[in-house]
Image (spheres, helix red, strand yellow):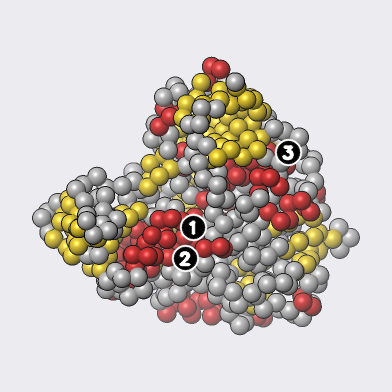
Amino acid sequence: MVEHCSYVIVGGGIAGVTAAETLRNEEPSAEITVIADTPLPAYYRPALKDYLADRVTEDTLYVRRRSFYADLGIHFMLDRAVRIAVNQHALQLSSGRQIGYDRLLLATGARASRLSCPGSDLAGVITLRTIADYQATLRLLQTARRVVVCGSGSLALETVEILQHRGIQVTHLLRSRRLWKDILDRTASELVLHQEEQDGVDIRFGEEIAEVIGKKGDGGQVLGIITKNGVRIPCDVVVTAIGIEPAIDFIKESGIACGRGVKVDHAMRTSIPDVFAIGDAAETCDPATGRERIFGQWYPAMQQGRTAAYSMLGMLGTRHLRHAETYSNAYLRSISAQYLYGFDVAAIGITNVSSPEYQEIQADPRTHIYSKVLLKDGIPVGMLSFDGRRDALAFKRAIDHAVNLMPVASLLFNREFKLTTWLDAQKVPTPVLAVRKLSQAPRPLPVRNMKSQFVGMGGMTPLLDLPREDIESVNTRSNTDPYMIPVVTMSGSRRGDAGREERRQTNRQEERSMRTDTYTHTSIPTAAFLVPILPEKTADILRTQETQSYALSLDQDNTGALISPEWAHTQISQTQVVTIGREPDSTLVINHNSISRRHAEIIYRNGDY
C-alpha cells in the first residue's frame, strides 16, 4: 500500500529542516513528511569545533527541540530511503513502506571521506563530521599525547590549532603547501603555515598515510602510522579531515542526473520533474565560472532549503537583482568567515584562480595585512581578506550586482576609501543575503507558536523573507554563525599584528566619540534576516511604525548575559554606531562564551539598519 503526502523531505539536517519550516509557514494546511534515519534534531555543525575546544556544551549545539516536527504539524518518520520510483512519484523505505509524493526534496547530506589503507578500521582512526564523532574524539583525547591530522581544508586547520592549544603534540600531514584550496591562494597559505609552524606544529609536506599501525585486539589502539614515503610517525590518534562524500547512492540508481552530487539548477530542481535536492547532497553551478561545486557550508544549506521550498510552491523570485539571469543564485554566494591562527579570514566568490582574464588587486603590503579582490573585465568576482572582514559585505554587494569597480580599483584597500559609501552613491542595491519569493505580501509569522522551537546557540529565526514595511513582530534565537550577520562587521581575533590592534583601537575611539546616552542597545532585522545576539534566549524585535525606530524586549531568565533591563525599548539614532561584544567599552556588553570580544556593530546606511 502506498501512503501519499504532498511534500516529502528526505533528511533532517539544517537544509531539510529549513525547507520544512518554510513550507509550513507558507502553507499552514499542507501535508509535509520528513524522513530521516536519526531522531536527533538538527544541530549547529559550525560550532562542533568549539565543542572540541571545550568552549560550548553539547546541549547548546542543537538548533531545534525534539518536539519540533510535532509543534509544526509535520509528520516525522524514522526510516531510510532506499529507492525512488520517479515515474510513479513514489519513495521506497528500508522498512518496506512506500510513500507517494507530489513534490520530493532530497536533503540526504554527506558523510566524511575515510582512509582505505590497512589499519584504517582501528578505533583510534577518526573522522570529524557528527556529534558522535566529536564525542568519540574527546574520549580518546583524555589519554592521547600525540595526534596525527591528515587534511588541508578548513576542518583540518581548525582541528590542528585546537589540539595544539590543548597541549597535544600534533603532526600535520599535507600533500603540498597549499591549504584550503577553494579559498586560500599561495600567499595566504604561506601565512597560515608560518603561524602553524610558530605554534610548534610538526608539519610534514608531501606525505600521505599508507598504513595505520595498532592493536586490533586492544580496543583498536593506534600506535602510529607509516607514510607512503616509508616514514614512521608514532601517535595515539589519527584524525582524517579529507573531505566529504554526498550520500546519494540510491539517488544515482533512480536515473536522476548526478555528478559528485545531485545536479540542480538555481531553483534546486533536479533533472526529474517534481524532484529537488539541497544541502551537501546537491551540486550547483557557479554562474560566474561554470564550475560545478558542492558548498558543504551551513549558510548555503539554509538558503537552498528556502529556495527549494519557494520553488516547490512556485514562489521563487529574482527580480531584486540587477542581472537576474546571470546572478540568480547570488544568495548562495556566502561569506566564508573563519579565524585561523589569529587571522580573521573572510572570502567571497572566486578567490583562487590563475588566468590572464582575471585582474588581481592587492592591498599595499606595507599594511602587513593580506587582502585582494579579483576582477574580470572590471567586474568583481571574488574577495579574500585577512583584515577582519573589513568591507566584506560591501564587496559581496558589488559582486552580487556586477558593479564595475575599475573607476575605484586603485582605492579599494585605501583606509580612507569607503566602498559602501561609493556603492550608495551608485545606487547599488543591498547585498543579496537571502533568497526571495515572488509574493510581496507574505503571511504574518505565527510568533507564539514558533517561539518555543528555537533553542541553543545555533537557533535560527523562522526563515521567511519579510519586506521591512511588513515587519510587525518576529522571533529569533541566537546564532554565532558569521554568515548570519548581514549588516554588521565582526572582529575579535585572538592574536594579530601590532598594526591590526592599533587600527582596532582607533576604531573603538571613533565609536565612543559617536555615542550619547539616548540610544538603544539591540539588534536590527534586515530584509531577510535578524541579527541574532543573545545565546539560548528569545528576543522579540518590534518595529514602531510611528517613530520609525526599533526596540528590543529582552527575556532576562537564564541568558547568562549581563544586560541592564532599562536598555529595552529605547531608541536608536541614525547617526549612532552601536557595538556589541564582551569588551568593556562596547555599547552593549554581553559576557557570554558564545559572544566574541567585538561581536557586532549596528549602523544606519542608505535608509536601512
Residue 219, position as x, y percentages in the image: 27, 58
Q: Residues within 10 Å of mark 1 (few under 14, many from 20)?
A: some
- Which residue corresponds to mark 3? 26
Residue 307 visible: no
Q: In the image shown, does 43 or 525 lie closer to the viewer?
A: 43
Residue 249 sits above or below residue 517 on the image = above
- Which residue corresponds to mark 1? 46
Label 2 and label 1: CA atoms lie apart by 8 Å
Label 3 and label 1: CA atoms lie apart by 28 Å
Residue 128 appears left or right of 487? left
Which amino acid does the dot numbered 2 rest on? Asp
Residue at 56% from the left image edge and 17% from the top image edge = 88
Q: Which mark is residue 50?
A: 2
Residue 346, position as x, y percentages in the image: 47, 59
Residue 230, position as x, y percentages in the image: 10, 55
Residue 79 appears left or right of 204? right
